[in-house]
Image (tube, rainbow, N blue to C red):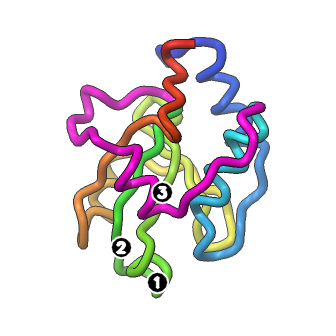
Amino acid sequence: MDAKTIQRRLVECAHAVHATSDGLCAGWVKQVFSSLGFGMLAGDAIDIYDGDCPYTDTADLLVGMVVATSREPYSADGRAYGHIGLYVGDGMVMDSAGGRVRRVPLELWLSAYGIMAPPRWGWLAGIALDQM
């Protein structure tokens, strides 16, 4: 994994933070960042998608970036608010779905959650971990 210490620490936090209830995927992402010391950040998945995720080229994807979509077909919450996870490197995304934290191959995540809206990625709240 090509990442700075703080990016690797975020991945460790992602493994340590417990799953959230269904429909609270953004809450899990924000808890991961909070456990790293950034406090509780605002927004649901669609807010983060719209405000923090400008990238669509996987060449721009870095460890610790949020990966999000504004709509997904698997739940009422997903259709209204989208879905979000964290890129943890080595072609993997972690998210909270179905009451558990999952580690999913990026390509599978993108194809599964990109059905209704194109996935995008970026730094949560503009916190560019690769610059710290």
Q: Give the x, y percent position of residue 4.
A: 57, 12
Q: Give the x, y percent position of residue 13.
A: 73, 36
For the residue marked with disc 2, what is the amino acid? Glu
Front residue (pair 22, 124): 124
Q: Residue at x 40, y 35 (%)?
A: 91
Quadrant where the C terminus sits is top right
Judge the density around disc 3: few (<14), some (14-19), many (≥20) Cα neighbours within 10 Å: many
Pointer 3 with pointer 2, Cβ within 8 A? no
Front residue (pair 24, 96): 24
For the residue marked with disc 1, what is the amino acid? Ser
Q: Badge 3 is on which residue?
A: 84
As helix, strand or loop, the secondary structure at mark 1 comes to loop
How far, Cα to Cα, is label 1 from label 2?
7 Å
Q: Badge 1 is on which residue?
A: 75
Give the residues drawn in magenta, as a range.
37-63
Judge the density around disc 1: few (<14), some (14-19), many (≥20) Cα neighbours within 10 Å: some
Q: Give the x, y percent position of residue 76.
A: 46, 87
Among the two numbered marks 3 and 1 on one chain, the one whose residue lies closer to the N terminus = 1
Q: Badge 2 is on which residue?
A: 72
